[in-house]
Image (cartoon, helix red, strand yellow):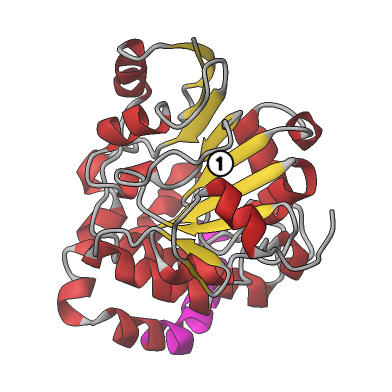
Amino acid sequence: MSRRSVDGELLGRVYPGKMIRDGVVDLDPPAAGYLENFGVQWQRYRDTQLDSKNGTTISHDFLVRVLGSPLESLRGKTVLEIGAGAGRFSEHLAEHARLLICVDSSDAIWVNAARGRSNVALVHGDLFTMPAPVPPVDLVLCRGVLQHTPDPPAAIHRLHQLARPGGEVVFDIYGPGRLGRLEAKYLWRRVVPRVFAWSQFEALLRTVAEPALRMRWRVKPLLPGRSKRVLDYFIPIWDYKGVLPLGDAELVEWAILDTLDALYAVHDHPMTAAQVLAVIEGLACDVVSADTANNFFRTRLR
C-alpha cells in the first residue's frame, strides 16, 4: 500500500465539511478527563506494541484471532477502527483494507502508525457522539476499548449503528476475571492513584520496573501453577515473561505501559460473555462467532 501522504480530498469524502487539523478530521469530541492519561501514554509509548518496531507478530496474530479470519479477507473493504490509539492494529489493517478509518478520542490519533497512508483517514472523535462516516462501512473493529467506556452496553449498541446493513462488527471486552473485584489491579488501583499522580508513578516505574521484574522472574519459577499470581499482590507491575516473545528490555517497556493502563483507568466495566450476548440479542444482527473464553464477538447486521 502506498505511503504517500493522504490529502484533504480523502478526509473530505469521509467526513465532508468537518474541520481537518494537522491531517486529522477533528470532530471535536466532548472533553473527557478519563482520556487524558490514555492520550499521554500512547504518545509516549507509541512504538511499544507496534510489530514494525519490536520485530514480532504479536499484534498481527492477536488481530487475526479477534477477527477470526486472515487479514487478506479485508481486501476491498472499508474498515472502521474504533479506539485505534497509536495504531498497533492500524498498521496491519491499512495493508489490506481498501479504506481504513481510524477513530480515537484521545490525542494518540495524531501519532497513529498508519498516519500518512493513502488509504487511511484518521479521525479525532468519540464513539457516542461521532456521526457515521459517509462511505458505507463493511467492518467495524473495536478491540480493548469497551471496558474503558462509561457504558459498555450502550457502546456495543453504538458500534452496530456504524456498519452498513450486511456489514460486520468485531469487538471484545474484558471479562471480570476469576476473582472479580479482588483481582490485584483493583486493589492496587485503590492505592496507587491516590499516592502518585500519573506522571509521578510513570517516572517511578522508569526507575524500579526493571529490577522489580527481574526479582519476579527469579521468584516465579519457584511457585507452582496459579500460585504465581500471588506476586501480583506484592509487585504491582505487569509481567509478560514467558507470555510474549520479547527481549527483557521490551518486556520492561510493555510492562510499564500496561501497568499505567491498568492502574489509572477511570472506567473499568468488564462484562461476562453471557451479559454481552444478552445485549447482542436485542440488536438487529446475527452472531457470526462468539469466543466466550476470550470475550471476542463477531456479528453481522441484518
**Can residue 198 be seen in this snapshot?**
yes
**61 or 279: nearer the eye?**
279
Q: Residue at x 24, y 82 (%)?
A: 197
> In the figure, 223 relative to 260: above or below?
above
What is the quadrant of residue 200 in the picture? bottom left
Left or right side of 156 for 13: right
Q: Residue at x 24, y 52 (%)?
A: 267
> For residue 217: magenta?
yes
- Indicate the position of residue 261 as horizontal and vertical percent values: 39, 63
**Can residue 234 be seen in this snapshot?**
no
> In the figure, 24 relative to 196: above or below?
above
What is the quadrant of residue 162 in the picture? top left
- Indicate the position of residue 108 as horizontal and vertical percent values: 48, 68
- Indicate the position of residue 167 as horizontal and vertical percent values: 57, 22
In this rendering, the count of numbered labels is 1
Residue annotated with mark 1? 80
Q: Residue at x 53, y 70 (%)?
A: 110
Q: Secondary structure at mark 1?
A: strand
**140 or 204: nearer the eye?**
140
The magenta region covers 204-222
> For residue 150: magenta?
no
Q: Main secondary structure of the magenta part?
A: helix
**188 or 24: nearer the eye?**
24
Q: Residue at x 41, y 47 (%)?
A: 145
**251 or 6: nearer the eye?**
6
> In the figure, 106 relative to 253: above or below?
above
- Indicate the position of residue 57 as horizontal and vertical percent values: 76, 52
Residue sitting farthest toward the right: 2
Identified by mark 1, the residue type is Leu
